Amino acid sequence: MPGRMAGRRALVTGGASGIGLACARRLVAEGAEVVLLDLSSAASAAAATVACDVRDPGAVAAAVTRAAGLLNGPADVLVNSAGVYRIAPLLDLTPGEWDDVVTVNLRGTFLAGRAVAAALIAAGLPGAIVNISSTAGLVADASEPSAHYNASKAGVLALTRQMAAEWAPYGIRANAVCPGVIDTPMLRLMDDPAAGDAYLQAGVPQRRLGSADEVAAVIVFLASDDASYLTGAAVPVDGGMTAI
């Protein structure tokens, strides 16, 4: 629906690749002005990019302010897509490895969400936040142990619900998407193609990988006025894997 996001100012963390980049492209296609926040400030064909480490409160606050200057106003759409994925069995998982993942995935989502919401509330403007969780925040999988990642993504779901509850009086909606096995640079499932295909056949009713564009379509819907009465929700985009 071209033009659905016309007049909106969007900020996408982790926007240099994967789901974040797909979101940026779709938001632009639907009329939004977009700024990306990413560790690298390398120019992107999708949108202007501001270098930012989402783990750092000062860096996040400064980047959100700079993005507002580029957007000619505070961002009224935030897509929290910055994230890392690691595999380690629980008995081998070190506190440092735990912190590395949880700090980016959960702390980063909190810091960016807080900064954007504070700017909107100060300006008296409504907005929409979409946080990227994962089916790993809903179900466990002993075949691919990643407790630190799973815990961070479950935390994103709880954080999303709290954002929705606390910020609804200000006209700010917050929802989450829970992608399943999506064909992005972060995907490890297909490192062994035969085993990956067997997993898809047995564990994903649609029996295929999802695409970043398919996830982006749901994210942009949640950010749009088409989802105006939807807040605090967690939407699986997983080919049906959490339905079985």
Image (cartoon, rainbow, N blue to C red):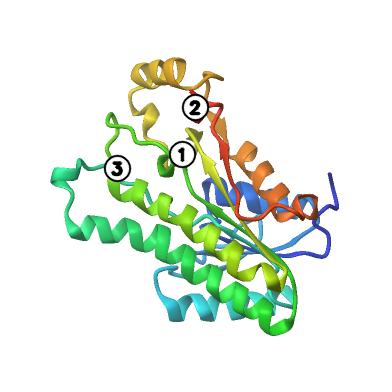
Q: Which residue is mark 1?
A: 135
Q: Amino acid at mark 2?
A: Met
> CA–CA distance between discs 3 and 2?
18 Å
- At a point 23% along the width and 55% down the height, the residue shown is 97
Label 3 or label 1, whichever comes before in sequence order: 1
Asked if labels 1 and 3 touch by Cβ distance under 8 angstroms, the answer is no
Q: Are there few (<14), some (14-19), or many (20+) residues within 10 Å of tag 3? A: many
Q: x%, y% of residue 86?
A: 30, 46
Inspect the image, locate mark 3, and give the three-letter code of the amino acid beneath it.
Ser
Q: Is residue 172 visible?
A: yes
Q: Residue at x 29, y 60 (%)?
A: 100
Look at label 1 and name its amino acid: Thr
Horizontal and vertical percent position of residue 236:
56, 38
Q: Is residue 134 above or below residue 109?
A: above
- Circle 3 is placed at which residue position? 146
**Relative height, residue 90 to residue 144 (above, below):** below
Q: Which mark is residue 205?
A: none
| Secondary-structure class at tag 3 | loop
Question: Callout 2: few (<14), some (14-19), or many (20+) C-alpha neighbours within 10 Å?
Answer: some
Q: As rendered, which of 170 and 220 lies closer to the eye?
A: 170
Helix, strand, or loop for circle 1? helix
Query: On residue 241, which mark appears?
Result: 2
Residue 125: name its quadrant: bottom right
* Residue at the (41%, 57%) spot, across then down: 105
Q: What is the secondary structure assignment of the residue under circle 2?
A: helix
Is 16 placed left or right of 151 in the picture? Answer: right
User: Which of pointers 1 and 2 lies earlier in the amino acid sequence?
Assistant: 1
- In the picture provided, is 167 more to the left or to the right than 57? right
Give x and y (percent) for residue 162.
Answer: 53, 63
- How far across and how far down the image is residue 41, in percent? 51, 67
Residue at 59 percent across and 50 percent down: it is 21
